[in-house]
Image (spheres, rainbow, N blue to C red):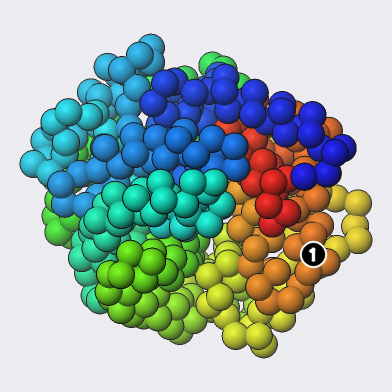
Amino acid sequence: MKHEYEQLAQEAIKVLQGNWTGSFTRPGSILYHHQWSWDSAFIAMGYIHYDQDRAEQELRTLFAGQWSNGMLPHMIFNPQASNYQDRLQFWEVERYRYAPRDRETSGLVQLPVHATAILHMYRHAQNTAQARAFLAEMFPHLKAWHTYLYQERDAQGEGLVYIQHPWESLDNSPVWDAILQRMQLQAEEVPAYQRVDIQLVNAEDRPTKMEYDRYAYLVKLFAARNYDEAQIRRDCPFLVQDVLFNALLCQSNRDLAEIAQILNEDPVPFQAWAELTSQAINQKLWDDEHGIYLDFDLVANEQIHAYSVAGFVPLFASIPDQARAQRMYTYLNSEAFSPLHEAIYAVPSYDRLTAEFSPNRYWRGPVWINMNWLLAHGLHRYGYHEYARRLRQTIIDLPQQHGFFEYYNPFSGQGHGTDQFSWTASLLLDVLYSGE
């Protein structure tokens, strides 16, 4: 680590220390008091550089909430949080026989970066014997998690799993607008719910009431069907083969295959899944007009023509060939997102030439540190080293200049959402320690 960044690294460690609960790390000190699935995966990748025990405990706590059918919930509830009981009543997961009885969880999933995180931890661990033992401990959990996704969320055997709620990917992305607007609800169909977010941070930065009404409606639909995927698929209005989810799953399969080899287990099933998903993403989700990958709406049976930064993440999983990668780079390195030498913080989370773009609203335009981390690795793999360096530098500059926020305005760098955000701190640490 460069000497000039040592104080910044200590500030990042202080953020994580402040959010540590004794068994897991809260995503943020103000707004998020429970454990979130992909947050913990990113958080562990920062811890591994200076506290291997805590990195392992982070994911050990998360997987303690795994359902017996392999499903890894997107939230594990913290009984010490003030709104704990309200959360339980909202989700009603006790209706489902596979839900754990010794942990309280949500009934959705979140993006599958866990095998990637665990292999990353192994590569950077100080105690290699302990790290290998942790791989062996986590391997059956990861195998069950991936098996669940392909058995329950890929009904046609295409190699593309679906998400059934915006909370399973990039919450309020414009990608979901048409689907949510298609859900015409009567007042009595919207269940009662409480929003904490707009009481603690600027409501203009957060999802709208229209969006939240539909989020709540979907959760109650799942609970009414006892979280049974076969029943949910019959009439769920939100079934999407999501680019981001499947690209991260593809890379996690590659990483799980490598974990299997380290443990002298059979890597072939995971290599086969990775190849199946990679081919399906290339065949079904590519948009040749713009040079980006798009989500697919299974209900409408069509691609969703909405242009999110998530559409570039297949680079992280080595999915496009070099010609397609060049098309993607051309789109990324344009006014639509962030030209290499423009005075803007890269990368906005949505095409800024569209009417849907907003520089301050959650996933509708702000810069997110985790997306920059994924894209930096992906661009590096394809030889776009200058842009990858720019993204790594942005991961450093934004927290250093504006604080450890959840997301940032791409023009001013101003932080938005909750402050003291854990994955911002952890991925900064990963960049500072590993230079990656």
For disc 1, the marked residue is 387
**Residue 349 placement (x, y as % from top left):** 66, 52
Along the line of sight, which residue is nearer the eye, 114 or 249? 114
Placement of 389 over or under 168, stated as above or below: below
The answer, for residue 36, to whether it is visible in the render is no
Along the line of sight, which residue is nearer the eye, 37 or 160? 37
Placement of 69 over or under 33, stated as above or below: below
Query: Which residue extends farthest left?
Result: 97
Mark 1 neighbour class, 10 Å CA radius: few under 14, some 14 to 19, many 20 or more:
many
In what quadrant of the picture does the C terminus appear?
A: bottom right
In what quadrant of the picture does the N terminus appear?
A: top right
Looking at the rendering, which quadrant does residue 240 occupy?
bottom left
**Residue 99 placement (x, y as % from top left):** 16, 39
In the rendered view, does 367 fall on the left or right side of 180?
Answer: right
Q: Residue at x 81, y 37 (%)?
A: 5
Kind of element beneath mark 1? helix
**Residue 342 placement (x, y as % from top left):** 90, 57
Query: Identity of the amino acid at label 1?
Result: Tyr
